[in-house]
Amino acid sequence: MGIKTLGICLVIAGFGMWGLLGARRTDKRVRQLKYLRIALGFLEKEITYMQTPLSHAMKRTGIFTDVEVAGLFKECAAQLEKKSGVTGNEAWQSGLKTLKRESELKPLELELLASVGPQLGVSDRIEQQKFFILIQQELKMLEETAAQEAEAGRKIWSYGGFILGGVIVILLL
Amino acid sequence: MTGDKEMVNQQIIPYLSPPIKKIIMHLDESLFTSLEEIRLRSGQPLVMKIGEADYAIDIKGKLAQDFRNTYVVTGEDIYRTIASLSDNSLYAFEEEIKRGFITVKGGHRAGLAGQVVMEGNQVRTIKDFSGICLRIAREIKNCAEPVLKNVIPGSGQIMNTLIISPPRCGKTTFLRDITRNISLSGQRNVVVVDERSEIAGCYRGIPQLDIGPRTDVLDACPKALGMIMAVRSLSPQVIIADEIGRTEDAEAIQECINAGVSVISSVHAGNMQELSRRPVMKNLLEQKLFQRGIVLSRRQGPGTVEEIIRWA
């Protein structure tokens, strides 16, 4: 009887934990979109006010950005610092591969970020600023959508895990 | 000469797009010693000016004066070369682009062609680049040796001097060497007002070419404005400025000379007759502000001294 009770508890707790982790992942995605938006704002200032060369601007953004998304900027800076003829776009796409591995972002969000690459450093300050403002606005919209999804999903994931665990226990019994 | 090869290998070739880099690597390096320009024009052959002649280059790195069946520059080549030249940061070169060129490490210049965007009467930027002209900057130390005693006579006073020549005859190289020699000899402060960044070849404000230990540079500064600024703030004994010709330049020169500062400058003209036909220059010569004139040509190669004129 004792073993059976322990088993039931373990199944429910296991599924419950899985659900809680799922809920955390949805929150993480919202947070990462916010960090990326702030980081792009920082990069915009480096480019438009400081006129920092792109490799250095990326490096600084990587340092001042939360570790969850810093990989994008650090990898991009590392590629540019090689000075081997890599373009801003190629370096950015390489950084995005790192971000894809390390983040919870969805394909649509990664696609929006990919559109930043071809514009990096190829125009004057005014044009760069316009583009960065636009991207930040679009990221804000994605962030709001992600927040709504997270709000709805959080309860489903949190309770869903325990409920699923309970259902499986009943079925097994 | 080995220096020239190294210079081209280290300071020019790395900026080129990978396909062009690959082709040029096949070239005989001894040609680099007389390489003057590399021209990239989208959809046109890659052209290299070596000595006095233009050559196209085939994919095996063979030079040809017949431009057929040679490497054709692509839009991608232009894009990648511009990206390298600007360190992927065109926004950091706005002022240079407005002037039509980017100066890179070593003082070399990349002239830019493309669509010019205007704002009122001013150039705002150049976009959609279609051509790049990479001009290799070379210092020829002591090239001005034959004329130095006319510019710096024994008395110690520096003569107000005008170097006169058509383009590509070595005016700027002469001016740079005179600057270096004045800066090295005696206790004189020299200011170079380098509107086109050609004399000192500044890269991010630092002169890339040897202009001597007592020389300050006002880089990318309009000549007339720079000469007055220099007199007020840098207490020079000598001011150097390239390619004068506007009324305001003449006024600034007059101001400097009247303030006791010697001026050495250059001007575009084939000879004295041509120079006298330019109203601003005619007026300046009539005032006898300049004491020496040095006429250069390419008759026996760049920097051939044709005539030394003593106006005073």
Image (cartoon, helix red, strand yellow):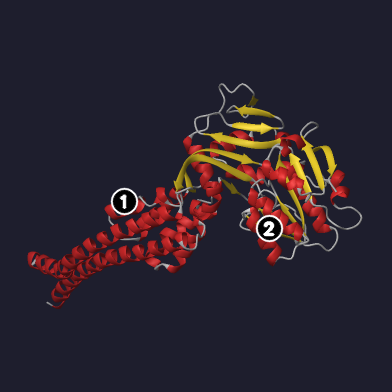
Please identify the quarter of the rendering in which residue B7 is found: top right
Residue position for label 2: B227
Give the left or right position of residue B13, taking residue B191 as reference.
Answer: left
Callout in the foreground (2, 1): 2
Residue pictured at 19% horizontal, 64% vertical: A148
Q: State the residue in front, A34 or A51.
A: A51
Residue pictured at 83% horizontal, 38% vertical: B307
Q: Amino acid at mark 1?
A: Glu
- Looking at the image, can residue B27 be seen? no
Residue B119 position, x and y percent, is 44, 49
Q: Secondary structure at mark 1?
A: helix
Q: In what quadrant of the picture does the N terminus of chain B appear?
A: top right
Label disc, if present, on residue B3 of the rendered structure: none
Q: Residue reaching furthest right?
A: B154
**Could you classify mark 2 by the number of other residues whose Cα lies within 10 Å: few (under 14), some (14-19), or many (20 or more)?**
many
Label disc, if present, on residue A111 of the rendered structure: 1
Q: Is residue B312 above or below residue A69?
A: above
Residue A32 position, x and y percent, is 32, 64
Residue A33 position, x and y percent, is 31, 63
Q: Amino acid at mark 2?
A: Met
Give the left or right position of residue B308, taking residue A40 as reference.
Answer: right
The tally of labels here is 2
* Discs 2, 1: same chain: no
Residue B199 position, x and y percent, is 70, 50
Q: Secondary structure at mark 2?
A: helix
Residue pictured at 25% horizontal, 60% vertical: A141
Give the left or right position of residue B110, taking residue B74 as reference.
Answer: right
- The subunit carrying tag 2 is B
